[in-house]
Amino acid sequence: MASVTIKNLPDSLYKKLKVRAKNNHRSINGEIVNVLTRELNEGGFDVNEFLKSAEKIRNKIKIPLTDDELIAIKNEGRP
């Protein structure tokens, strides 16, 4: 696998990458690879990555919700 060194990276961009990496539980390098992969893929959307993220969020919920319960919550208050 190739390695890349980024020169003259603005501090403000580095700080944004650092925050984003922390929020996504990745290293800064992992976040850069993720951003580049998403940006450079033709679709720009990785279904598998989305499903992994959704599963992580679901696992954080203390009380497991069924699909029917989630649909009911989503539709609550809609005509």
Image (cartoon, grey):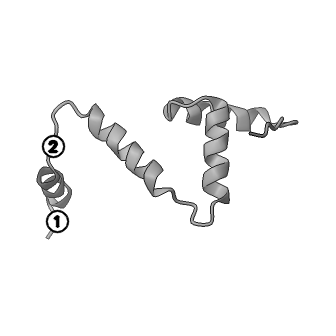
What amino acid is labelled 2 in the image?
Leu
**Looking at the image, residue 17 lies above or below residue 54:** above
Query: Label 2: how many residues lie within 10 Å, few (<14), some (14-19) or many (20+)?
Result: few
Q: Position of residue 57 (x, y in %)?
A: 33, 39
Quarter of the picture holding the C terminus: bottom left
Q: In which quadrant of the rendered view does residue 68 lie? A: bottom left
Residue 53 picture location, percent across and down: 41, 43
Task: Give the SS element for disc 2.
Answer: loop
Residue linked to disc 2 = 65
Give the SS element for disc 1: loop
Q: CA distance from mark 1 to mark 2?
A: 20 Å
Asked whether, in this view, residue 30 is left or right of residue 24, the answer is: right
Question: Residue at the spot x=50%, y=33% of the render?
Answer: 23
Q: How many numbered marks does the figure carry?
A: 2
| Residue on which the image places disc 1 | 78
Is 56 situated left or right of 37 in this image?
Answer: left
To which quarter of the image does residue 78 belong? bottom left
Report crowding for label 1: few under 14, some 14 to 19, many 20 or more residues within 10 A (C-alpha): few
User: Foreground residue, 44 or 2?
Assistant: 2
Give the foreground label among 1 and 2. Answer: 2
* Residue furthest bottom in the image: 79
